[in-house]
Image: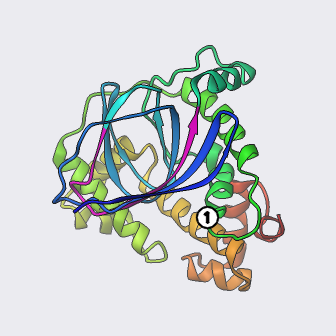
Amino acid sequence: MAKIAVELLARGDGWTVQDVICTSGPQDRPFEEKHSCVSIAIVVAGSFQYRSAAGHELMTPGSLLLGNAGQSFECGHEHGEGDRCLSFGYAPDFFERVAADAGSASSEFHRIRVPPLRALAPLVARACAGLAVSMDVPWEEISLELAARTIRLADGLSSHRSDPPTRDVSRVARTVRTIERHPDARLTLRALARMVGLSPYHFLRTFERLTGVTPHQYIVRARLRAAAKRLASERGKVIDIALDCGFGDVSNFNRAFRAEFGVSPRIYRRA
């Protein structure tokens, strides 16, 4: 029996933050739900299919699920069990004011997903770190910044294209879950393509079309997300965390971390 556990982490005048854990799997049939407010949910773990009248997308860790108030949707787990999301909800009038202040011409989303892009990586890592630390988390600041950045970024992304074949969604979902389970493993393009029975070129095109990033970009960002989480919650040496997360040497890790999050691992940890 599928279950959804929701924990309210914080709330304010016009906004809420919730930790949402779903245990649905292939045996559970999707059912229609409705966004009661404007929603931006960071996918923390797992993968699932998100469907609405605006399109159909594969949701993967690091991506953002978008929903307008009153919009109906379904979430399906045909290709794997469970997911976890950090869900930010906004009252429509509150979100409209934030969108206007951010310079957006519209306060409605015209797409249903933002892929795991570098432009949002520092903020996504900061928000997810809030799940791992016991100290006070500035949820109001994060909520406002996430709303403003997301509406601006979503405005500039291309519109949704036709729904992909189910077999392609299954292949990419299986690949994503393998990467998330073993981000430190040596996962080459050829090995991943062989695992799902595709040529390297076809796999590269399919993966990028469904996730918004290339397999290499996804692997590096999965390793960096794992490292950022450990830096925020553990006291281990930076070099040990880098090696554990799949980086060959600490200098390579430092360069990748700074490029993704804008600061060095040590400064990130102190912050």
Total labels: the figure holds: 1
Dominant secondary structure, magenta:
strand
Q: Is residue 205 magenta?
A: no
**In this view, which residue lies farthest toward the top?**
105
Callout 1 crowding tier (Cα within 10 Å): few <14, some 14–19, many ≥20: some
**Residue 184, horizontal then vertical, whole percent:** 49, 76
Identify the residue at image location x=66%, y=61%: 130
Helix, strand or loop for disc 1:
loop
- Residue 134's place in the image compared with 55, above or below, is below
Q: Amino acid at mark 1?
A: Leu
Where 264 falls versus 153 (above or below)? below
Q: Report whether 164 appears left or right of 181.
A: left
Residue at 64% from the left image edge and 43% from the top image edge: 119
At 63% from the left and 13% from the top, the residue drawn is 105
Residue where numbered disc 1 is placed: 131
- Work out which quarter of the rendered image holds the N terminus and state it: bottom left
Image coordinates of residue 21 in percent, x first then y, are 42, 60
Task: Please determine whether, in this image, residue 39 is positioned above or below residue 59.
Answer: above
Classify residue 103 as left or right of residue 116.
right
Provide residue 224's location: percent of width, then percent of height: 60, 65
Which picture quadrant has residue 249?
A: bottom right
**Scheme by which the image is coloured:** rainbow
Quick one: 226 or 3, which is closer to the camera? 3
> In front here: 7 or 121?
7
Give me the residue at 31% from left, 65% from top. 192
- Choose between 74 and 112: the one closer to the eye: 74
Which region is colored magenta?
74-90
Q: Is residue 136 left or right of residue 209?
A: right
Q: Is residue 98 above or below residue 244?
A: above
Dividing the image into 4 quarters, which one contains the C terminus? bottom right
